[in-house]
Image (cartoon, helix red, strand yellow):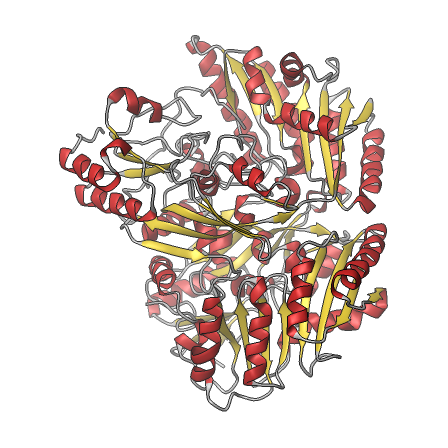
Amino acid sequence: MPDTVEPQVQQDVSTAIHRAFEANTAIYPTGGGTSLGFGLPARREGLGLSTASLNRVVDYPARDMTITVEAGITMKSLAETLAKENQLLPVDVPMADRATLGGVIATNWNGPRRFGYGNIRDYVIGIHAVDGHGRAFKGGGQVVKNVAGYDFCKLLTGSLGTIGVITQVTLKVKPIPEAFALATSSISNLEVAEHVLSRLVHSDTTPSAIELLAGPNWSSPLQLVVRLDGTRSEVEWMEERLAEELLHDTSLQTEMLRGEEAVPLWKQLVEFTSQESPLTIRANVVASGTTKIVEAAQSIDPNCSIQAHAGNGVVFVSFSEFPGEGLSRTILGQLQPLATSLHGSVIVVSNPSHSEMTHQCVWGGNHVAFSVASKIKHQFDPKDILNPGRFVYS
Amino acid sequence: MIHKLNPGLVNELRQIVGAESVLTAHSELLVYECDGFIIDKNSPDVVVFPRTTEQIASIVKACSVANVPFLPRGAGTSLAGGCMPVGGGVMIVLTRMKEILEVNLRDRYAVVEPGVVNVWLTQRLKGTGFHYAPDPSSQGACTIGGNVATNSGGPHTLKYGVTVNHVIGVEAVLADGSIVQFGGPTEDPVGLDLVGALVGSEGTLAIVTKVWVRLTRNPQGYRTMLGVFESVDDATNAISDIIGAGIIPAALEMMDRGILEALEAAFSFGFPLDAEAILLIEVDGLEAGLDEQRDQIIEICNARGVREVRQAVDEKERQKIWKCRKQAFGAIGRLSSSFCTQDGVVPRTKLPHILRRIKEIEKKYDLRIVNVFHAGDGNLHPILLFDERSAEQIERVLKASGEILEECLACGGSVTGEHGIGIEKIHYMDKMFSEDDLNAMRNLRDAFNPLNNLSPHKMLPTAGACGMEQKHPGRRAAL
């Protein structure tokens, strides 16, 4: 672990980065440290910059359904604040007691409910950050609709702390739904799974999450979980309708979990990616390609565990052991070509062995987009002091 | 700053797209001298109509070599001068790239060329159970490429979000003529969110040549209501109460007495002309929840002294209500020969305050101001009526507009919710943003458009200088 500074106020972030800029010292921003394995390892020694003390609620006009907070607030603390007003940020994140909002935005982390509620980028309406010179800048504002200037809220989402350290965020939030239920079904094979998933696209119900689960982590070898959110009467209607649709069109039996019964499985779904594993990867493909990725992963490691946000084509594979043929052969040789054929990509989420962590393995290769991103990086951080090495910049 | 027509460049453009797709005659160029913002006008030197991405790349390269500025244009329905060619140059009109290339329901996306008119996609999707959610009031004319450039909103953005929430990928030609693809049919593209950076960049970062849009499942049902209020205060308080109660209607629009008069004259819908304000409230979703939401809304309106809440009896009546709302701007001609629309935003709890202030400003400047706007989002569209033959009236309109926008900023809002900065609001940028913020924006522009030859003099004031001051209010066409 490098030495770490912990700014107490946002201004201190500017000061610390400006100093680092002058001294050409690398800065490694951290929130709760829950995603440190995400991306490539650090390229050179430097200084940690923890946002942990930047955890204040700046303004919470609950009746406007917006909130302004400092970026180091934990997702749990944010959720507790919002819950007092019966509101939520519907982004499901593991280790919420440690994970910070700034970290979630910087890693563009999205959980199961992305299908129904959208992604973190859809909720950030204002953002403050500090660039690689130590200059504070902002984008967006406090209102839900605003097209003044370039959208730094989007640009910083997924930027991995490489073009700016996020210090403050304004979010729009949602009311907590009155009720929810989880519909679970065992599925016999992947062919049936794709049939079921394609049927769900046309469902009369409005699922907030569509999860396809496989492997020893889960209670059955292949399982579908659909989350239904809404008012009590809406959820009751959806439970009945969904069970009918699945039985009638795909011969699936459905079990409904409600209230307290549903909590353990839901927790498992949110926390899955935080479990230690010799290798975790994420594939992003078209939704219809989900089962193909599952099949390919299982052929590499029959004991892998998989959670797919199947409505969105986002597949997490947690390998039971580090692939015997190595990372390059597994990813570059097999999974990436498959994902490319499904219009998407594969990235490494965590690889504790650090073996073969080349940028081709970790980030794949949209070289055109990377070269544009590099130009932006150079504008915001010309000395490459913000999280150097983490992402591929030329 | 007029660019002398460069005959070599014109010949090259003719070779790229064919002579019939290049306009150079003054009379033909006049059509392209402005968008819906008609105060500042300037003709391009040449207009070209490419049909392919490769043609656009060649055009851009030719312009760069000739050192001539260039910019894209869709249908020209934008309202802030985003596609006005400051300093002339080559205008690349994208309306011949109008194919819907793919509709994929299984993976919930469509791929369209930039010149596809917004409503064409809606029509193509009819019967599929899906739709493309962003529905600007100009959707019958505006193009999806233009929607991407301006990050367009519309009445239903309250629940469904604006354009950027529904665009998952773009193909674009950069200012150096290279062709790039950011995002695509899959989510979470690796690296920076360049799709998010391009949407709403008002044509200053790249020319979008293909768009991947997310498709949204149609709601099972609707309840569309008109709440008739005796006072604007009661209506705006009801809006704030509805949002505060955690209800997210699909749309929540307000029309005041002034606009109702014009609408009634135009459409004979049967709006009560003695009401001070009408709220158009639509909830959508599962039938199982709609009556409950409707009743809750009626209860809130009752608590705020609503005279009556009328519900659309059938789909036909619902469509008629929406026609009135979306064509409201066409009806304003009945009130005044010229008008100027503002596009400020305030936090929703500040709506009662800002509407009172607008009333005071109306009195102070002895003007008539009518209101029809996206109330649920806090996105105002005060319409200032005037006679453009009177220089003295024009001055009052400008002062009143400025005061309204300043008040929006004082409330913690924005000077534009959906129309954009363009050239119209460029002098407000330094009121919303610090010099460091603006420099960060210039940095982003320089990464994409280092020579600033792609749509120059837009959105960002020149560093260290005052922005363009507005001399005339505009006669805007839509909202």
Quarter of the image where the C terminus of chain A is located: bottom left
Residue A258 image point, x, y percent: 84, 64
Q: Nearer the viewer, residue A16 or B92?
A: B92
Tell me what residue is drawn at x 68 percent, y 17 percent.
B257
Could you say which quadrant of the image residue A112 lies in? bottom right
Towards the viewer: B64 or B232? B64
User: Image height check: is B159 above or below B375?
Assistant: below
- Seen as rendered, the residue at the extreme top is B390
Count up the numbered dots.
0
Q: Outermost residue toward the bottom? A: A324
Report if residue A54 is visible in the image: no
Can residue B119 be seen from the camera position used here?
yes
A83 sits left or right of B302 in the view: left
Q: Position of residue B395 (x, y in %)?
A: 45, 15
Above or below — where is A338 with respect to B461? below
A27 in relation to B335, above or below: below
Residue B85 is situated, as x and y percent measured from the top left of the image, at 32, 32
Residue at the left extreme? B8
Snapshot quadrant of residue A220: bottom right
Image spot of residue B432 (x, y percent): 48, 40
Q: Residue at x 40, y 73 (%)?
A: A389
In front: B328, or A250? A250
Asked where in the image residue B430 lies, by quadrant, the reply is: top left
Q: Please determine whether, in this image, residue B273 is positioned above or below residue A255.
A: above
